[in-house]
Image (spheres, rainbow, N blue to C red):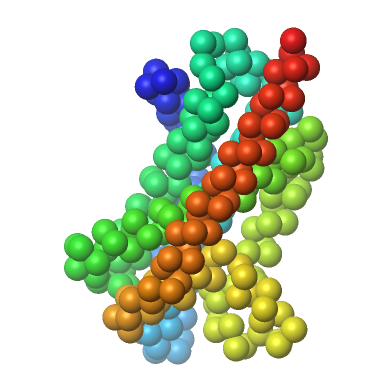
């Protein structure tokens, strides 16, 4: 099992340009947008709130990329067929996929959070660690959703890319990244409230900017992550079993 996880990690780092491009894009968005808005409006609080929203946006992008790669594996079948020939059970294969997605999420999230903290938030170490751990929980939710989508539409590589790309603007703009929920039309507010990243943004902003720990949002986020990981696991298992039958 450990060797398989190493194999998935090597596969992740095989295309270093992908990781570097993510790091560069996050550096640009986090350094320029909140800084520029702060200079224009002279509102440091808004820059801090926006930077927290941009962390959530980074989680969305990285999770969707992980889902697209997973979908490509199901379409091309070469990698997954090789893995099915190994002496591994299906659960190990699925956890390996989640491990690879989680590893990419962890790297980009850690870099993004440290950058935001240095430039805008200036949190002490323990508070920063807790924020990081909470955001990791949110990446589990997004990874579960992305894996579920890729499992359902994994027969068509174009559909995988298109659908996952549509998810990004939906999560991005129907969320409080740029402005509060009350700024949305009333008809859209319920949709914004059920957006998974809305909870992470509200919790982190409340915890960091107001020093208030929202226990309700915290437990809801944990349960949400568990739910989507289970759904993602079930759908991935069904997809891999189906591929195994066709291979046989």
Name the outermost residue toward the left.
125
Position above or below: 166 against 182:
above
Spot occupied by residue 92 in the image (x, y as percentages of width and height) = 50, 25
The x, y position of residue 50, in whole percent, is 46, 75
Residue at 41% over, 53% down? 136
Residue in the image at 38% along x and 73% along y: 215
Q: Nearer the viewer, residue 67 or 248?
A: 248
Closer to us: 121 or 200:
200
Left or right for 139, reference 44: right
At 41% across and 20% down in the image, what residue appears? 1
Residue 183 visible? The answer is yes
In-front residue for pair 156/240 = 240
Within the image, what quadrant is residue 242 found in? Answer: top right
Quarter in which the C terminus is drawn: top right
Estimate the x, y position of residue 82 in percent, counting from the top left. Answer: 60, 13
Count the numbered circles shown. Answer: 0
Q: In the rendered image of this protein, does residue 192 appear above or below residue 129? A: below
Q: Quadrant of residue 240?
A: top right
Query: Can you say whether 91 is above or below 88 in the image?
Result: below
Is residue 39 among what the camera can see? no
Q: Is residue 61 above or below residue 187?
A: above
**Could you say which is closer to the camera, residue 21 or residue 51?**
51
């Amino acid at each position: 099992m450990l060797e398989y996880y190493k194999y998935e990690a090597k596969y992740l780092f095989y295309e270093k340009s992908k990781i570097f491009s993510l790091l560069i894009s996050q550096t640009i968005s986090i350094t320029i947008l909140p800084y520029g808005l702060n200079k224009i409006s002279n509102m440091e609080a808004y820059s801090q709130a926006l930077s927290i929203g941009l962390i959530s946006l980074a989680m969305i992008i990285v999770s969707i990329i992980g889902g697209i790669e997973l979908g490509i594996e199901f379409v091309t079948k070469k990698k997954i067929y090789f893995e099915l020939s190994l002496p591994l059970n299906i659960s190990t294969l699925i956890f390996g996929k989640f491990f690879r997605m989680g590893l990419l999420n962890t790297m980009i999230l850690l870099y993004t959070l440290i950058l935001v903290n240095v430039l805008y938030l200036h949190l002490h170490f323990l508070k920063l660690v807790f924020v990081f751990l909470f955001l990791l929980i949110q990446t589990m939710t997004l990874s579960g959703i992305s894996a579920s989508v890729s499992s359902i539409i994994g027969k068509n590589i174009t559909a995988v890319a298109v659908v996952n790309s549509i998810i990004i603007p939906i999560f991005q703009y129907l969320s409080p990244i740029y402005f509060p929920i009350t700024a949305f039309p009333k008809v859209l507010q319920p949709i914004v409230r059920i957006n998974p990243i809305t909870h992470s943004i509200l919790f982190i902003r409340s915890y960091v900017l107001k020093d208030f720990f929202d226990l309700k949002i915290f437990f809801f986020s944990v349960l949400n992550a568990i739910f989507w990981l289970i759904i993602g696991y079930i759908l991935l298992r069904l997809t891999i079993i189906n591929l195994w039958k066709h291979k046989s």
